[in-house]
Amino acid sequence: MIRKQKYIVSSTHLDSQGYMMMKSALDSMLPQLNGKRKPRLGLEHIRTFPPFGAISNGEVFQGDDEQYYLSAEMMYFDKQEFITLNDGTKLVKEYFSEGEYPFIECEENEATKLSIATDPANFEKLNGHKEIYELVKQETDLEFDTSEFGRKSELPDPETVITITKILATTLGIIKSKVTEKLGEAVGEDLVKFYKLISTLAIETIKKAKPSNRPKNFVISYPNTECNIELVITTHKADKVLNSLTTEKLKLVADKIEQLKNFDAEKIQFTFNDYDNWEFNYLLTKTGAVIGTIKSFNRRNELYNKILEKQNNQEKGSS
């Protein structure tokens, strides 16, 4: 049976980061929660953890304190099975026994222009992230858009998302597609500019983002109609970010994508490991299931159990 729990997910109260949501902002979240596609039920906004399930049935109501609250239902996967690939790799699949709830994050449109997004909460200065964008613009004439995102947590690890176009994805070797000779020359110039952009962005972000003692997450996102690709590099070192994006390193990604598409994947995530190689982490399917490595699920469950243990100890201490 699917386990469901109702929680308050947001409100018009001042939050721990000093922000306050308007009621209209709470209302704007309802289409995502109540539509066919659902937000993931994650853990501490950690992108590299497979979801526990999905979030649904949103409702905005006014409390006795006259503040407005957004409640939603947390639905936990209730089925699990193991899968073995032809090369012997063992994977875990989690899904719902009833219903299909594809993830809303898999419905991104293909990018027509490079873009950079980050969370302003990870910078001391109000516009610290914008200063980084300006420095990047000074170092490269490759055009890009910028945006911000927020995460409801005390202070999540710094995260920068770089969304790339099909041409860049092809040139980097993330996907297998032919490039004409004439286009290849122009793209080759853009690739040099792209590496310069990544270098400056990584150096400045690692230098200025907080917490300074936590590694920084750099996400290369290639949204497209066939299957979204996400590459995550977690590091303190700017040169590791650059090293991860060489065509030699990314060849493994392209080969693995072809193998994993058989699972009706809508999104596939890879992480850059301690041995400086890309490895498959998990994927999300068209039916809203998650399939990933045993290691990815173990990491998620380990942190979840630590959080539960900490909460239980606090409750015992206060009783």
Image (cartoon, rainbow, N blue to C red):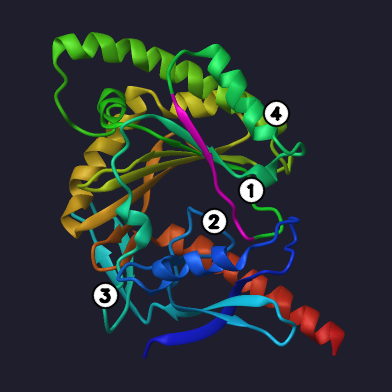
Find out whether the residues at labels 1 and 2 contact each other: C-beta distance under 8 Å. yes
Q: Label 4 is placed on what type of residue?
A: Lys
Find out whether the residues at labels 4 and 1 contact each other: C-beta distance under 8 Å. no
The correct choice, above or below, for 280 with respect to 134 in the image is below
Can you identify the residue that label 2 sits on? Answer: 46
State the mark number for residue 1.
none
Can you identify the residue that label 4 sits on? Answer: 207
Foreground disc of the pair 1, 3: 3
Mark 4–mark 1 Cα distance, whole angstroms, equals 14 Å
Mark 1 and mark 2 lie on one chain; the one further toward the N terminus is: 2
Q: Residue at x 60, y 68 (%)?
A: 23
Q: Residue at x 63, y 60 (%)?
A: 152
Q: Label 2 is placed on what type of residue?
A: Ile
Q: Position of residue 222 (x, y in %)?
A: 33, 39
Mark 4 and mark 3 lie on one chain; the one further toward the N terminus is: 3
Residue 311 can be seen in this image: yes
Q: Nearer the viewer, residue 276 or 132?
A: 132
Q: Label 3 is placed on what type of residue?
A: Glu
Mark 1–mark 2 Cα distance, whole angstroms, equals 8 Å
Can you identify the residue that label 1 sits on? Answer: 157
Can you identify the residue that label 3 sits on? Answer: 100
- The answer to whether 229 appears left or right of 152 in the picture is left
Find out whether the residues at labels 4 and 2 contact each other: C-beta distance under 8 Å. no
Mark 1 and mark 3 lie on one chain; the one further toward the N terminus is: 3
Residue bounds of the magenta highlight:
144-152
Is residue 117 within the magenta segment? no
